[in-house]
């Protein structure tokens, strides 16, 4: 057939042959077709198969699946988990022309991401996330360079434990407002609620306060909607494996809908956060006293820091991009888990009643005395980390580790899913069991610094020099929200509306599919507390 096709093409497309008898013999045609077939195979097949690179002395990259992939869209952690079982704690996978090395063991994570942090702390220039949407900014998208150091230093001024004390009362207030909203909107537990916008507004208000010294006054406010929609779009477009355009360069030249969405998101971020920055600036110029916040710092130090407009807008957006979807996701996973674990809820109620009593609800200072609540929070973070692959790091030099070669520019993925389901460390790992954390009285921030990584609580905040800078704030927010929800309500499911704990939304940050639960006040003392809380307009 191939022979006939070649004959046909040759005679129709080469005019000089058209009127002459075709002189190639059948045998020659067969040879020609074999050559063409071999050339095509030699050119095309390697595009689909892994490259097994070695360094100058013959050390190979870690083993891994035979095929190259263009993307892994649906629940990529499941594929990683299967491969980790097959290929071990360090395996490699090709996405188009990009090599990924996947870390699925705490010791390897420590050896590479922490001990060798000078080599493994950069970021790949993902087309969608790092180039189109964030333009290499927003801390998370910067390479391991002076821009990253500069921007992270500015952000850290608001995120250290000492800095957090300056706005601790705001976090406390927003947690009270969260409870108040759930209490009134659920009409004493009779009206089921989807907690997404409540948890979202809580996390958003905290980040708006730290970023702009402002807040929203209702979960239906247009800014809540806009900011949550931008955060969701960001999570949907920035999965480390989800866009073929990140791995197949020619696709970047084509005006696909994904590329257009990315460009629109970039413009929206600049528009929304730029406008909020300018609003703070004009109020400051008008003599208004703005509470201490990131944007005030940016304005006051603009001459010294020399940030351009894109830097400024992206930094203004950093906390909202990093700290809303993630924190609100964990609160939502907690609420999704709670109704199917009444025994755990009852034990939490018991601890709160014993330690706190019914006159007031828990405050930040009570955390150390509520080990079971702390254990619940750690366990939610373990079984439902919002980022199963953290944010991948990237190597900046060739490196050899345990007889395996890790080339420069390799993307390093922390496989939290497999690490969080290690049966030796977390027996019966698919079961939600806070008891496994009883006796662990370290905060996540303290736990992340343990030299014995087998004892680290979980890897939800990443590792090494790029570890989440917001983790101390996030821990405070989670404690206040979760302990107060438990103190105030019994959370129940609606029998006809099962809650899925397996499926989720978001390509990089995971939140549960929409669900509703009932928030039943535990007793009348709740009413006395919430009725005294008023919404503040800033
Ligand atoms: C429970 C909530 C949160 C979770 C689970 C979380 C998780 C993470 C993870 C896994 C990373 C990547 C770490 C790595 O590269 O190894 C990260 C980075 C980051 N997070 Fe968070 N985060 C949370 C809350 C926050 C908050 C509240 C903020 C801001 C106040 C924040 C700001 C950032 C920033 C700016 C980065 C980029 C750091 C860098 O590239 O140097 N996050 N976060």
Image (cartoon, rainbow, N blue to C red):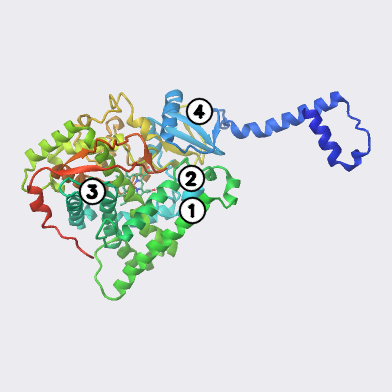
Mark 3 / mark 1, whichever is N-terminal = 1
Q: Mark 1 points at which residue?
A: 261
Q: Name the residue under label 2.
A: 124
Specify whether tag 2 is near ligand 1 (CB below 8 Å): no
At x 14%, y 41%, the residue is: 368
Specify whether tag 4 is near ligand 1 (CB below 8 Å): no
Q: Distance between the residues labelled 2 and 4?
A: 20 Å
**26 horizontally vs 171: left or right:** right
Q: Can residue 328 be seen in this view?
A: yes
Q: Is mark 1 on a helix, strand or loop?
A: helix
Percent of width and height locating residue 449: 28, 39
Percent of width and height locating residue 275: 38, 66
Q: Name the residue under label 3.
A: 477
- Observer-side mark, 3 or 4, equals 3
**211 horizontally vs 96: left or right:** left
Which mark, residue 352?
Answer: none
């Amino acid at each position: 057939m191939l022979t006939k096709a070649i004959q046909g093409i040759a005679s129709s497309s080469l005019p000089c042959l058209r009127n002459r008898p075709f002189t190639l013999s059948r045998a020659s045609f067969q040879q020609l077709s074999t050559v063409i077939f071999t050339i095509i195979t030699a050119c095309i097949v390697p595009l689909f198969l892994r490259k097994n690179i070695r360094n100058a002395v013959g050390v190979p990259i870690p083993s891994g699946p035979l095929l190259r992939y263009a993307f892994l869209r649906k629940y990529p952690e499941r594929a990683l988990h299967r491969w980790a079982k097959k290929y071990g704690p360090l395996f490699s996978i090709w996405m188009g022309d990009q090599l990924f090395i996947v870390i699925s063991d705490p010791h390897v994570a420590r050896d590479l991401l922490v001990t060798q942090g000078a080599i493994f702390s950069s970021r790949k220039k993902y087309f969608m996330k790092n180039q189109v949407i964030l333009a290499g900014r927003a801390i998370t998208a910067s390479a391991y360079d002076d821009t990253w150091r500069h921007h992270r230093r500015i952000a850290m001024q608001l995120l250290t434990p000492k800095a957090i004390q300056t706005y601790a009362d705001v976090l406390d207030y927003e947690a009270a407002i969260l409870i108040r909203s759930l209490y009134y909107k659920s009409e004493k537990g009779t009206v089921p609620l989807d907690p997404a916008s409540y948890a979202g507004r809580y996390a958003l208000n905290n980040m708006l306060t730290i970023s702009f010294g402002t807040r929203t006054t209702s979960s239906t406010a247009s800014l809540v909607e806009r900011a949550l929609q931008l955060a969701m779009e960001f999570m949907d477009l920035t999965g480390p494996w989800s866009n073929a355009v990140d791995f197949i360069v020619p696709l970047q030249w084509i005006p696909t809908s994904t590329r257009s969405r990315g460009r629109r998101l970039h413009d929206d971020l600049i528009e929304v956060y730029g406008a909020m920055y300018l609003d703070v600036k004009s109020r400051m110029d008008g003599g208004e006293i703005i509470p201490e916040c990131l944007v005030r710092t940016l304005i006051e130090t603009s001459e010294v820091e020399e940030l351009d407009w894109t830097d400024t807008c992206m930094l203004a957006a950093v906390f909202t991009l990093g700290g809303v979807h993630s924190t609100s996701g964990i609160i939502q996973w907690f609420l999704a888990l709670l109704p199917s674990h009444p025994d755990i809820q009852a034990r939490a109620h018991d601890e709160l009643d014993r330690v706190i009593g019914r006159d007031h609800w828990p405050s930040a200072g009570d955390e150390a005395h509520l080990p079971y609540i702390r254990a619940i929070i750690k366990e939610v973070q373990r079984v439902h980390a919002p980022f199963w692959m953290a944010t991948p790091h990237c190597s900046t030099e060739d490196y050899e580790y345990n007889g395996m070669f890790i080339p420069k520019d390799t993307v390093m993925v922390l496989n939290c899913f497999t690490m969080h389901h290690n049966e030796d460390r977390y027996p019966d790992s698919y079961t939600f069991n806070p008891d496994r954390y009883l006796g662990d009285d370290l905060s996540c921030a303290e736990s992340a610094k343990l030299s014995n990584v087998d004892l680290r609580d979980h890897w939800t905040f990443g590792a090494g020099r790029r570890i989440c800078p917001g983790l101390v704030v996030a821990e405070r927010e989670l404690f206040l929200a979760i302990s107060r929800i438990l103190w105030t309500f019994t959370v129940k499911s609606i029998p006809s509306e099962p809650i899925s704990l397996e499926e989720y939304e978001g390509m990089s940050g995971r939140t549960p599919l929409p669900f509703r639960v009932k928030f039943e006040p535990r007793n009348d003392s709740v009413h006395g507390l919430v009725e005294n809380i008023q919404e503040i307009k800033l």
